[in-house]
Image (cartoon, helix red, strand yellow):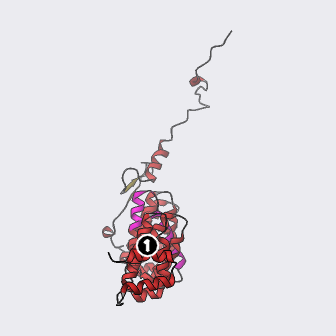
């Protein structure tokens, strides 16, 4: 005789020894919060966390009332394992940069190391706050960030911002683009160009494209002597290589680099096109010369 089968729902009866599993609502809310939810200007954590993170525009940041006494707690906040406190400290780093920059100079390397670590964090709020802090630090310190004693920290920061500018999260990507623009505006073109040069060889095509755009913006600010100091041949060769890159943004940046170089090169030449063509033929392959002359020939 066939035995009646119990419904599966009743196979494991609920008893005090075997309670039902509760749905992980808090986890799903937390994950939504970590990645910005539907509001890209504020991250709201679960009520139990009792915290919000605001993205404060630079113009709305206020001076620190007693900066000398605040500096120690600021350093402790940077080292905190509580990401909310790290966000608060990064906003304080922005305030120090804008209003009390002299106090922050001895801490620049440490701050940049924390910025890099925060950008690698999966929490979008922490990542975006660190990128915003980078922009303010670029604006405040400029070429001081290229000092040999902290140069390696700057290299790591530059790479992370390029990586964030290359990702798919729009509000992080746009903030990273703004940081790159602040960097180009605030630093001297020649040493920055030397830093960016290695980035156009990155394996990620999006990173190469973002680096190429920053290079193009640097070159547009340079005169003939600066280009000669960097190396006219190196500059034109870099542009020629990027013309064959995978992404159209990189190729467009390459065209901009070559046109800027051409305009500066021929400025004092009587036979402009002939001088430029002779220069290219002396330093590039025939197929590269053909591409470059086509781009730089006035229509």
- Can residue 177 be seen from the camera position used here? yes
- Can residue 88 be seen from the camera position used here? no
Depth check: 44 or 116 in front?
Answer: 116
**Which residue shows up at 38% across the image and 73% down it?**
182
In the picture of the structure, the residue carrying the numbered disc 1 is 254
**Which residue shows up at 58% across the image and 20% down it?**
7
Q: Quadrant of residue 135?
A: bottom left
Q: Residue 225 at what x, y percent from top left?
A: 42, 89
**Which residue shows up at 50% across the image and 57% down it?**
122
Q: Residue 189 at what x, y percent from top left?
A: 42, 81
Q: Quadrant of the N terminus?
A: top right
Depth check: 112 or 69 in front?
Answer: 112
The residue sitting at the top extreme is: 1
The magenta-colored residue range is 151-177
Depth check: 198 or 167 in front?
Answer: 198
Depth check: 132 or 207 in front?
Answer: 207
Magenta includes 269? no
């Amino acid at each position: 005789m066939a035995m009646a089968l119990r419904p599966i729902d009743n196979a494991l009866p609920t008893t005090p020894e075997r309670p039902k599993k509760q749905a992980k609502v808090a986890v799903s809310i937390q994950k939504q919060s970590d990645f910005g939810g539907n509001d890209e200007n504020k991250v709201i954590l679960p009520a139990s966390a009792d915290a919000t993170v605001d993205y404060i525009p630079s113009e709305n940041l206020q001076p620190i009332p007693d900066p000398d006494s605040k500096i120690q707690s600021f350093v402790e906040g940077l080292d905190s394992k509580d990401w909310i406190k790290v966000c608060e400290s990064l906003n304080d780093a922005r305030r120090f940069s804008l209003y009390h920059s002299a106090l922050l100079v001895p801490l620049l390397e440490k701050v940049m190391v924390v910025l890099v670590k925060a950008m690698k964090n999966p929490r979008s709020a922490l990542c975006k706050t660190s990128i915003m802090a980078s922009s303010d630090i670029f604006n405040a310190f400029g070429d001081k960030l290229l000092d040999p004693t902290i140069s390696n920290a700057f290299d790591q920061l530059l790479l992370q911002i390029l990586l964030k500018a290359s990702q798919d999260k729009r509000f992080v990507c746009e903030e990273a683009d703004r940081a790159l623009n602040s960097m180009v505006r605030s630093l001297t073109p020649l040493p920055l160009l030397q830093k960016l040069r290695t980035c156009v060889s990155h394996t990620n095509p999006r990173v190469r494209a973002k680096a190429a755009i920053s290079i193009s913006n640097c070159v547009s600010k340079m005169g003939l002597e600066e280009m000669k100091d960097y190396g006219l041949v190196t500059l034109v060769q870099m542009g020629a290589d990027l013309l064959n890159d995978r992404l159209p943004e990189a190729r467009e940046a390459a065209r901009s680099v070559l046109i800027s170089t051409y305009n500066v090169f021929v400025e004092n030449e009587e036979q402009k096109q002939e001088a430029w063509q002779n220069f290219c033929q002396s330093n590039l392959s025939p197929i590269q010369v053909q591409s470059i002359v086509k781009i730089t020939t006035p229509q």
